[in-house]
Image (cartoon, rainbow, N blue to C red):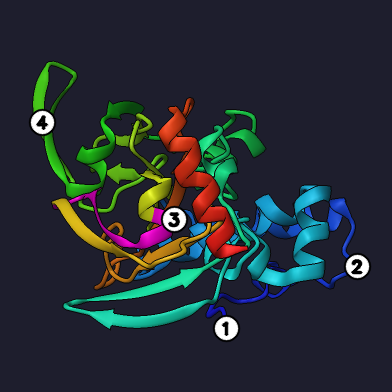
Amino acid sequence: MSSKRDYYEVLGVSRKASDAELKSAYRKLALKWHPDRNKEPGAEAKFKEINEAYEVLSSADKRAKFDQFGHAAFDPSSGFGNYGGGGQSYRSGPFTYTYSTGGGFEDLFGGTQGQGFSDPFNIFESFFGGSNPFGGSYRPKPHYSLTIDFLEAVRGAEKTFVHQGKQYTVKIPAGASDGTRIRYSEFDISLNVRPDSTFRREGDDLFLLHAIPFTLAIQGGETEIPTLEGKLTIKVRPLTQPSTSIRLSGKGVKHLQRSGRGDLYIKFKVMFPTKLSRRGKELVQQLHAELY
């Protein structure tokens, strides 16, 4: 069950709230909890929660999904991300393996990154159209974008950055993602993360499309996959179907604001030969006769 609060509750509106009522509620709460004004502990987390709620409820499509499915509509682990869920689990060494069939996540490897949320500060600035919402002498801090590689985001890194002629060392925490904002007293930096050719990321979970020969899928054995820590040998069960995926618990991205890590999902892509010799055809015929 999700630990998140209901988005309508976050904004303090009814489930039948109009667009005007949503905007009014958002304006009041965003101004109250903006961390540039509100220095209470937890103000930034509250501000992000308010913006996430407004981003969903101000979109007719996202609001309809939330009304029907709740937070599960935007949670990859719920099964709405098209990569299957459930399945048989067992432990082998330090890892928990979960096999499932019938649910693919090919869409994740075709450019679809799932239901991510926008930078809350960008939502705030767009809502007020760049004007000064606080009045008086308030001036928003300069906001810069910094592009980093995928592995720098998930592992953490240090980058140098120049602001008004002064060089700063930007410490990127392990588990940072696209849109993560790093706040300094003089300026803010938002991270743009380049996509990776091997992994796709959904929240703190990673997805890997891994090719195996059809002979390995039939008879079972072992195959070597890439992980964030390097190569890892995993088991392939006999008669593994092309739709099979495996979840490796705790092999994903480090959680940014709490302990632990996400999971690594491996989708097997079974590779068939493009041509057969006469002997190969005979063997296939024998196998067919044996199995069917």
Of all residues, the one furthest to the top in this rendering is 165
Give the quarter of the image for residue 198: top left
Pointer 2 local density, CA inside 10 Å: few below 14, some 14–19, many at least 20:
few
Amino acid on which disc 1 is placed: Met
Of mark 4 and mark 2, the one earlier in the sequence is 2
- Left or right: 132 in relation to 180: right
Q: Secondary structure at mark 1?
A: loop
- 105 horizontally vs 20: left or right: left
Of tags 2 and 3, the one toward the viewer is: 3
Q: Earlier in the sequence, mark 3 or mark 1?
A: 1
Tell me which label, 4 or 1, sits earlier in the chain: 1
Residue on which disc 3 sits: 203
Q: Amino acid at mark 3?
A: Gly
Q: CA distance from mark 4 to mark 1?
A: 42 Å
Between label 1 and label 2, give the one nearer the viewer. 1
The reply to whether callout 3 and callout 1 are in contact (CB within 8 Å) is no
Q: Distance from label 2 to label 3 (Cα)?
A: 30 Å
